[in-house]
Amino acid sequence: MNDEATTVVSAKNLSLTFETNDGPVHALSGIDLEVDKGDFVSFIGPSGCGKTTFLRVIADLEQPTSGEISVNDMSPQEARKSRAYGYVFQAAGLYPWRTIERNIALPLEIMGYSKADQEQRIAQTLELVNLTGFEKKFPWQLSGGMQQRASIARALAFDADLLLMDEPFGALDEIVRDHLNEQLLQLWDRTNKTICFVTHSIPEAVYLSTKIVVMSPRPGRIHEVIDSKLPRERPLDIRESKDFLDIAHQVREGLKAGHSYDE
Amino acid sequence: MTARSNILPLLTVIAAIIVFWYAAAVWMNSPWQIDRYKKASVDWSFSQLVSDTLNQERPVLPGAHQVAVEIWKTTVQKKITSKRSLVFHTWVTLSATILGFVFGTILGIFLAVLIVHNRAVDKSMMPWVIASQTIPILAIAPMIIVVLNAVDISGLLPKAFISAYLSFFPVVVGMVKGLRSPAISQMDLMRTYNASNSQLFWKLRWPSSMPYLFTSLKVAVAISLVGAIVGELPTGVAAGLGARLLAGSYFGQTIQIWSALFAAAALAATLVMLVSVIDRIVMKRMGFVSGKAS
């Protein structure tokens, strides 16, 4: 894919323990992972496996207890301060008092882009997520899927090569989700961004990813990393192909071996 | 609901209140009236008693028509510069109310911002804010007047301060809640943008708090009026609705008291309505769906 793969995220023996009233919770334990530029990496596992926590560590929203992590060869904090990534949360989290275009302008305002630049970027990203024409609408006037697309546009509006997505389609129905998955792949293909994507849907992980990180809980750790051999070009019906089902099977076996189905 | 379906229950309630009012007026004013009949040794009928009790000069409880006539006489038929004009007195109280409301709102917002941004202030200030409201305002109002008078501040300002003393409280409580209302994910989002504290405040906390602010302001404006009236009671001032109430009670002018009460009620309703209208306009412009905060 890339002539020379450069590492975007690199974690070495990374651990994070939350001290709670019920004793320590090992959210992450001994994580070793490299994410290369242009990768689409999915993190899959049951709740409590630390997939979201790991994403939050990359984003400098949580501090690791031990181990090393670098983002664009910087510490997560430096990366955050240089605005190296866009983060898409599970809930769209658009500001209800801002129109769609003002919502997308939010990071641009904060980062000090000029007015002209803002307008151009808003138009560009809205087109990217197929929301052109909805500039002046308020979030409540949009469906859940459209709101989530707007929140992706918001994360794409500024120059961050890394996109961190925390179960962005988790709350949406299957049909909308399929559609957004397809659009997300096209978007990834066009922008050549690196995407880290948290999900608990096996088909979603297999369909989207170049690399699937299977995680298991208590302590949260990486059980297996599966490289996908699916082509970069992926129509929706690729999900009935043998390759696809093989990988899905492999993911399921990985989850099983990691005791993800024990309870 | 349509206007038509609203109006019948409303009229029923008003009619019931008026019937009750007149019955009470006749009942409460009759002992004095009967006493007079006896002294004058006149025969009296029930219908005469009713008619007389509703037209006394200093009734225990005046009839609605007496209050209406008094209000008519002291508003429409008096020049507004006259000391006897209810409009004049209402304006005196209104000016103190507005000034107190503005002071209270500014103070309330200022304290809320401090409390939200500083843990130490949060811990140390909030108990005092709450304690301030447990002291009866009637007890503290004279002291404020006396103390301010000693430093040569009198007239409008002391009343406004008492008014502010009451009205800042709902603003503090509402704004602390409002400024803390953004979800954790919204705060996290601002963090991922590496937003500064002032950006976090102006782009997230402040707009998030607007619905809370207006709810507080509706309460604050009503009690601002209470504060202004209470502030007029111990000062012995000659003007204002509070002065009218006090003078009325000194001289047994119950009709005057009731007309001042109605003026105060009408003023309060107008002020709350005004804030509601501004609230609705702002919320609409901000894109909040009516009745929904997010």
Image: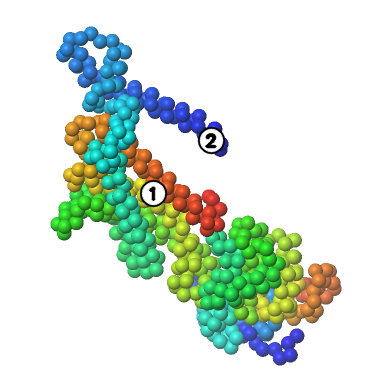
Residue B89 to residue A202: above or below: above
Instruction: Identify the residue at the far front of this view.
Output: B79
Residue A222 to residue B228: above or below: below
Q: Position of residue A253 (x, y in %)?
A: 75, 73
- State the colouring used for the structure image: rainbow
Element carrying mark 2:
helix
Instruction: Identify the residue at the far top of this view.
Output: B43
Which chain letter matches label 1? B
Element carrying mark 1:
helix
Q: Position of residue B192 (x, y in %)?
A: 54, 75
Categorize mark 1 by other alpha carbons within 10 Å: few (<14), some (14-19), many (20+).
some
Residue position for label 2: B3
Identified at 32% across, 38% down, the residue is B263
Residue B84 to residue B141: above or below: above
Q: Position of residue A240 (x, y in %)?
A: 84, 69
Instruction: Identify the residue at the far bottom of this view.
Output: A4
